[in-house]
Amino acid sequence: GQQLNQSPQSMFIQEGEDVSMNCTSSSIFNTWLWYKQDPGEGPVLLIALYKAGELTSNGRLTAQFGITRKDSFLNISASIPSDVGIYFCVSRRGSQGNLIFGKGTKLSVKP
Amino acid sequence: GAGVSQTPSNKVTEKGKYVELRCDPISGHTALYWYRQSLGQGPEFLIYFQGTGAADDSGLPNDRFFAVRPEGSVSTLKIQRTERGDSAVYLCASSPQEGNTEAFFGQGTRLTVV
């Protein structure tokens, strides 16, 4: 089936550092979403991308939809302790259908 | 409440028993999704509803799993003859409609089969 390859699997960074993670696939997608999940909670949407090449920011977060429509990245600037959690790249087949999740990037921030 | 509500939050059951997991979506949301998340993994799709009908149930692992949404609002995920491998967090999400819209997730039901 369609898979999203997310990297890195985990990151340990110092507070204040910038973070970059990405997601690739062998399939073309029309939507890229980035979700964050805190322990014991459901995933929460951070950024949604709907057009190839689109670059979108949400506060300290910036995400881009790759031109090939097979990849996306998420950057977090000036990380803070509450950025800790698991970040998932998510996509969707066409404009309908279920959401496909990557395996996640676990972010740890040292104060 | 304003969000997706899932009950119970935790469920411990014996192997072989039947369980029901409930999801109350956000009022007015027509699309409802069920996902299963094992420890250290991303959520895996099980089934989604558009209104009362199951639009895609291709993620259900076998015929022990079944879900209903009889009035197009609340949904129940039913698992028969539970096995230890069914232990996971079961997540429900809803969206205002199909298409490129945000899916809002509940906190999940942690199912443990002993």
Image (cartoon, coloured by chain):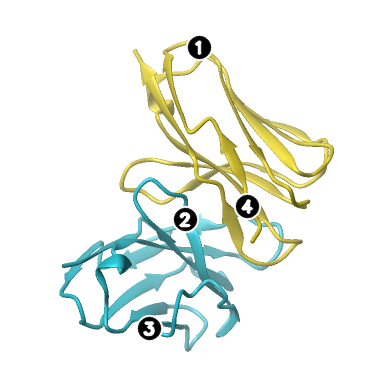
Q: Report crowding for label 2: few under 14, some 14 to 19, many 20 or more residues within 10 A (C-alpha).
A: many
Query: Which residue does the numbered mark 2 point to in the structure image?
Result: B43
**Mark 3 vs mark 2, CA separation in Å:** 19 Å
Residue B111 place in picture, x, y as percent: 26, 65
- The disc placed on residue A17 is 1
Give the colour in which the image draws chain B.
cyan
Q: Amino acid at mark 2?
A: Pro
The chain holding disc 2 is B
Q: Who's the residue at 46% across and 68% down the image?
A: B25
Query: Which residue does the numbered mark 3 point to in the structure image?
Result: B64
**Mark 1 vs mark 3, CA separation in Å:** 47 Å
User: Can you tell which of label 4 and label 2 is closer to the viewer?
Assistant: 4
User: Can you tell which of label 3 and label 2 is closer to the viewer?
Assistant: 3
Quarter in which the C terminus of chain B is drawn? bottom left
The chain holding disc 1 is A
Q: Who's the residue at 52% across and 82% down the image?
A: B72
Query: Which residue does the numbered mark 4 point to in the structure image?
Result: A3
Q: Earlier in the sequence, mark 1 or mark 4?
A: 4
